[in-house]
Image: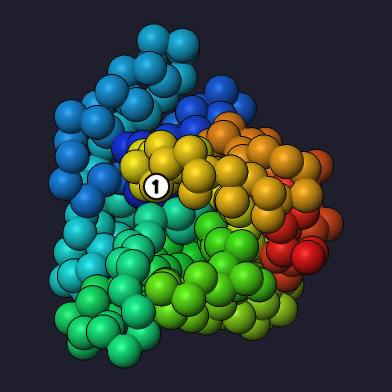
């Protein structure tokens, strides 16, 4: 049984991806930054449906905790880098602490996790690395400068690594969600006027659900996706095209 680590998988998109990969037959490591109870709920749902899962905790804003996570995990076949931190502030008001926290969580931790976990993939000549980006790589939100920049940096890293790891049987891709209805967006989308403004900016006319992102990750992790690497795939209802 292959093992998949999905960072930030106690809720939202990460949770949907973890459940999908478990249904695909992977042992899934559910990661959370602090809410063990939510992570255990995801684990219990997976095991209830016949899957295999375990929970691990680490604050990916902290490089020491990230390194400890690598040691605890050991070997994985699939690495889904979903965890992210997002602060909303006008660019003039961004503090260094906010900047460092977002960069550490959204980019630095991804680099460290790949460095620490790619060895096993190289040894077996098979592996899947998937970064979870954002439509903001194409359409940056004016109040999320660091977030959108960090996601773009992560995707550029993915493109570079896809070339360097292709000969080892490892594919590296990015999945960039658009407006997805998760707990991160619930409060904002509860404002009917704002929600209508958001929907009107999406060509399909509706925002997505976490499960809409899980299918493409499932494909990229499978043997059916073996010939796809170095790609950034938008799951955004066409928003990035406009």
Q: Does 88 sit above or below residue 29? A: below
Foreground residue among 146 and 32: 146
The chosen color scheme is rainbow
Foreground residue among 73 and 32: 32
Q: Does 148 sit above or below residue 77? A: below
Percent of width and height locating residue 19:
49, 28
Q: Which residue lies at the image location 57% right of the left edge and 35% below the top edge?
A: 209
- Residue 70 located left or right of residue 116: left
Percent of width and height locating residue 53:
36, 29
Q: Disc count in the image?
A: 1
**Would you say residue 25 is visible in this rendering?**
no
Q: Which residue lies at the image location 38% right of the left edge and 56% below the top edge?
A: 83
10 Å crowding of disc 1: few (<14), some (14-19), many (20+): few
Q: Residue pushed farthest front? A: 193
Name the residue that disc number 1 marks. 188
- Residue 69 located left or right of residue 4: left
Q: Which residue lies at the image location 26% right of the left edge and 63% below the top edge?
A: 60
**Would you say residue 45 is visible in this rendering?**
yes
Q: Quadrant of residue 64?
A: bottom left
Under circle 1, the secondary element is helix
Percent of width and height locating residue 75:
40, 52
Percent of width and height locating residue 202:
70, 50
Q: Quadrant of residue 42?
A: top left
Q: Which residue lies at the image location 42% right of the left edge and 41% below the top edge?
A: 191
């Amino acid at each position: 049984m292959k093992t998949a680590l999905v960072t930030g998988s106690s809720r939202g998109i990460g949770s949907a991806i973890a459940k999908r990969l478990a249904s695909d037959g992977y042992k899934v490591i559910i990661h959370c930054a602090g809410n063990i109870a939510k992570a255990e709920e995801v684990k219990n749902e997976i095991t209830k449906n016949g899957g295999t899962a375990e929970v691990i905790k680490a604050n990916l804003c902290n490089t020491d905790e990230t390194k400890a996570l690598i040691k605890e995990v050991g070997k994985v076949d699939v690495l889904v880098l979903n965890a992210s931190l997002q602060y909303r502030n006008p660019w003039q008001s961004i503090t260094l602490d906010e900047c460092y926290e977002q960069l550490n969580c959204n980019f630095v931790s991804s680099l460290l996790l790949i460095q620490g976990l790619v060895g096993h993939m190289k040894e077996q000549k098979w592996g899947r690395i998937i970064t979870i980006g954002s439509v903001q790589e194409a359409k940056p939100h004016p109040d999320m400068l660091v977030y959108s920049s960090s996601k773009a940096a992560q995707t550029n890293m993915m493109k570079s690594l896809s070339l360097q790891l292709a000969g080892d049987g490892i594919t590296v891709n990015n999945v960039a969600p658009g407006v997805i209805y998760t707990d991160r967006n619930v409060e904002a989308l509860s404002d009917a006027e704002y929600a209508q403004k958001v929907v009107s900016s999406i060509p399909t006319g509706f925002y997505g659900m976490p499960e809409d992102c899980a299918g493409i990750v499932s494909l990229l992790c499978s043997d059916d996706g073996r010939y796809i690497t170095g790609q950034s795939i938008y799951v955004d209802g066409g928003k990035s095209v406009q």
